[in-house]
Image: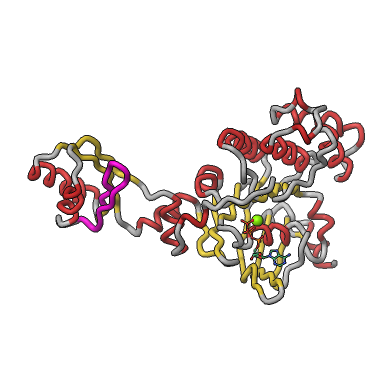
Amino acid sequence: MGYDTINAGHAAEAPAVAVSELSKRYGRLLAVDRVTFQVQHGEIFGLLGPNGAGKTTIIRVLTGLSRPSAGQVRVFAHDMERNPKEAKKLFGLVPEITNLYDELSALENVLFMAQLFGVPPQERLDRAHQLLDLFGLGSKSRVRLSHFSRGMKRAVAIAAAVVHRPRLLFLDEPTAGLDVVHARTLRRLVRRLNQEGVTVFLTTHYLEEADQLCDRIALLVKGRIVALDTPEALKDRASKGGVAVEVAFEPMLDQCAVGLGRRTGIRRVTARGDRLRVEGDKVSEVVAAIVAYAAESGTEITHIATVRPTLEEAFVQLTGLSSEVMKTEKGGS
Ligand SMILES: Nc1ncnc2c1ncn2[C@@H]1O[C@H](COP(=O)(O)OP(=O)(O)OP(=O)(O)O)[C@@H](O)[C@H]1O
Ligand SMILES: [Mg+2]
């Protein structure tokens, strides 16, 4: 108690989230294993991991829905075990499974949450309308939620989660199960809230989403953080100081890859659709080898470009897992 009171004065300087040596056990299963990280103000921080990695468990502990087995969690300097009440006023949560009422309208849902979070009665209606307008649901505000698509429901859930103007928003798999268009709309909403100053903590199993949306990503596998960095830095680490060049030949024959692979300065050649990906130490060496090969074999170069590793490649390198583990979808809304 005393500790929290002292620290509350420094809340502005403290990170939005500070997790230290957090573990969570379910019986014999260690779902979260000594996880340590901080989320800074203004960041979009992503927890990226396959099914069962422990993402939801971490969000539940961070938001006070579940108690840690060991370690410490602070949200704006408030200890989530000792003083969750203060912290809860400062964040919003969009859980993995919807917390909305299907039989209420979008507006009623947002108003209900506003009431729950103590938004002054005279402000509730204005704020709810503002948010629903902002999220493109203004014309549907009085429609029952049961008539909404998954994507629209998710947008209402976000509106409901920020109606008390939190400084931090937790989103557990915000776009899981959504089609491309709805997913894009939701990402835009998240970015917009972030631009307005809301720190975002999200979980996802979509590599592309983490890459596009997050300032920093923690890769979570079996309850452990195996890497934590900006998307660019993760990709750089995966390239291990090497370079890659993508090339297409006309005609493209199987022996192109074999012939190129034998040349000096080439580490590896792999087929990528109708192109080859050629890896080496230096761009100049790789390009020289490609040009020399084309001249000798009488094939024409129809495309050549340097390529950076994708986050998917970085994920595979850093976790030792196949990227297929990130593509298994789960049901539910
Ligand atoms: N209440 C619980 N009791 C027992 N085991 C649990 C409980 N909640 C989660 N687990 C287990 O803990 C591990 C982590 O689960 P969690 O839901 O945190 O993973 P996740 O990364 O969110 O996965 P998903 O991508 O499927 O949402 C899993 O093995 C899960 O079965
Ligand atoms: Mg989950």
Residue 185 coordinates in the image, percent (x, y): 61, 33
Quadrant containing the N terminus in the rendered view: bottom right
- Whether residue 79 is visible, yes or no, is no
Above or below: residue 118 compared with residue 33: above
Q: Position of residue 79 (x, y in %)?
A: 77, 63
Residue 275: image quadrant is top left
Which quadrant does the C terminus fall into? Answer: top right
- Answer with left or right where residue 223 lies relative to residue 295: right
Q: Residue furthest right?
A: 121
Q: Which colour scheme appears in the figure?
A: secondary structure
Q: Quadrant of residue 246?
A: top left
Please indicate, yes or no, whether residue 232 appears anywhere in the rendered image: yes
Which residue is rendered at x = 44% and y = 62% of the image? 318
Query: Total number of numbered labels?
Result: 0
Relative image position of residue 38 (x, y in whole percent): 62, 59
Q: Does residue 269 show up magenta in the picture? A: yes
Above or below, 98 relative to 21: above
- Magenta: predominant secondary structure element? strand
Q: Which quarter of the rendered image does ligand 2 occupy?
A: bottom right
Q: Most extreme residue toward the top, as rendered?
A: 139
Q: Residue at x 19, y 55 (%)?
A: 261
Seen in the image, is 135 located left or right of residue 105?
Answer: left
For residue 134: magenta?
Answer: no
User: Residue 144 location, x and y as percent?
Assistant: 81, 32
Say which of 222 and 64 sits in front: 222
Q: Nearer the viewer, residue 170 or 301?
A: 301
Tell me where residue 110 sits by quadrant: top right
**Which residue is located at x 78 percent, y 35 percent?**
145
Q: Which residues are magenta?
A: 266-278
Query: In the image shown, does 193 or 158 lie closer to the viewer?
Result: 158
* Residue at 79 percent of width and 55 percent of height: 87
